[in-house]
Every structure is written in C-alpha cells, then in structure tokens.
Amino acid sequence: MNWESLFEVSYQKCYGLPEDQLEHFLTQWHMPLSKEEIAEISGNQRNPFPVSDPLHKLYQPFDPAKWSIPNKPLPVDYLDFLRYSNGGEFRNGKRHFQFFGADELRALLLAYEFPEYMPGAVPFATDGCGNHYIWDMRADRVNHEYPILVSHSGNLGYEDAALIAGTFMELCRGTVSAEAMLHG
C-alpha cells in the first residue's frame, strides 16, 4: 500500500515501527491486566455524585480485575500502517485521524475503561474531537477485518456507537467526519 498517497493531508507522520518492536507490541497489547494496572484503575475511581445526591449511596465502583482484553489478531492493513507511521495525524476530506502509536494503544484502552463500557472493543485512533475509532472484536474477523465503530469518549457504549467502516482501509479512505457519522 502506498500510504503517502492515501491521505489528503499528513499533519504528523511518525517514524514507522521496526519489525522487532512490532512483534513485541503484538505479543503484549492484549495481555491480561497486571496487578499494578488493576490497582491504578481501582485507585482512580471516585464517586461522581455529591453526598447530597441520592445516587451517591448507590454508587458502586467497578472491578477491573474482571476485565478482559480481546486476544485476537489485529488487521494486516493496520500493522502495515504501523510500519509506515507508528501513530500520527492525517486527514481525508472532513475525516480526521489521530492514530495511537503501538505504545499508546493498550494504555488508552485502559485509561478510557473500554473493557468496562464496551467489552470486546479496541480503540486505535481518535478524530481529535473526542470521538474514538474502535474495532468491534466481539465476533471473529470477517476477511481478516473487524467492523469499525465510532463512539464519543464521554459516552462509550455500543448502543450509542455508529458503524463507520467495515475495514481499516475503508475507514482511511472515507471523507465523512466521525461526528457526522454519529449524529447524521
């Protein structure tokens, strides 16, 4: 694939991921949560309701020890993209991309608590306006690809997400903004 010609605008192309680092990433991104990750996520939880709110007493923190990260192969075209640019910012038409680098994917998946709000979902980029591009890995791949959803970071959930593409290349070639896909 000629990635140089795929995007209309390349705001920030990063160095491509060397093969040894790509192999390391592929063995690590989906590992079960470590004790340290569980402790950090648990320690960051706060009751969002003021004491005067009746919901304050009903608040129950979630248990990240119950989370699982899909242990499924990533799309080949995405891996090829990482070899070209390990993250970066690009645009086609009104569709913006801020791709996560290999060292960011797992951290952002956990920071946004995807295993809690969208089990089986793996975010790999944003549009720069709070919307995540997400692989829906609840089912097995079809032709080595997963459906790609878009969901706002402040409202994660399958019921409020929208299908934006059937493949990674379809997503990258698209020109309609993520916002327009979510809200028509």
Image: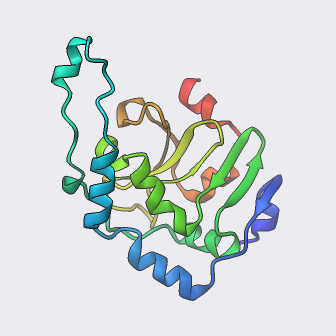
In the picture, which quadrant includes the N terminus?
bottom right
Work out whether 14 lies above or below 9. Answer: below
Is residue 120 visible to the viewer in this orientation of the structure?
yes
- Comparing 102 with 162, the one in front is 102
Is residue 33 visible to the viewer in this orientation of the structure?
no
Badge count? 0
- The picture places residue 133, in percent across and down from the top left corner, at 53, 47
Q: Is residue 92 left or right of residue 166?
A: right
Q: Going 36% across and 56% down the picture, which residue do you hit?
A: 137
Work out whether 127 lies above or below 109. Answer: above
Coloring basis for residues: rainbow
Residue sitting at the far bottom: 20
Q: Going 20% across and 47% down the picture, which residue do you hit?
A: 63
- The picture places residue 170, in percent across and down from the top left corner, at 61, 53
In the picture, which quadrant includes the C terminus?
top right
- The picture places residue 134, in percent across and down from the top left corner, at 48, 49
Q: Is residue 179 left or right of residue 65?
A: right
- Comparing 130 with 4, the one in front is 130
Residue sitting at the far front: 51
Work out whether 155 lies above or below 22. Answer: above
- The picture places residue 34, in percent across and down from the top left corner, at 28, 67
Work out whether 113 lies above or below 55. Answer: below
Q: Quadrant of residue 32?
A: bottom left
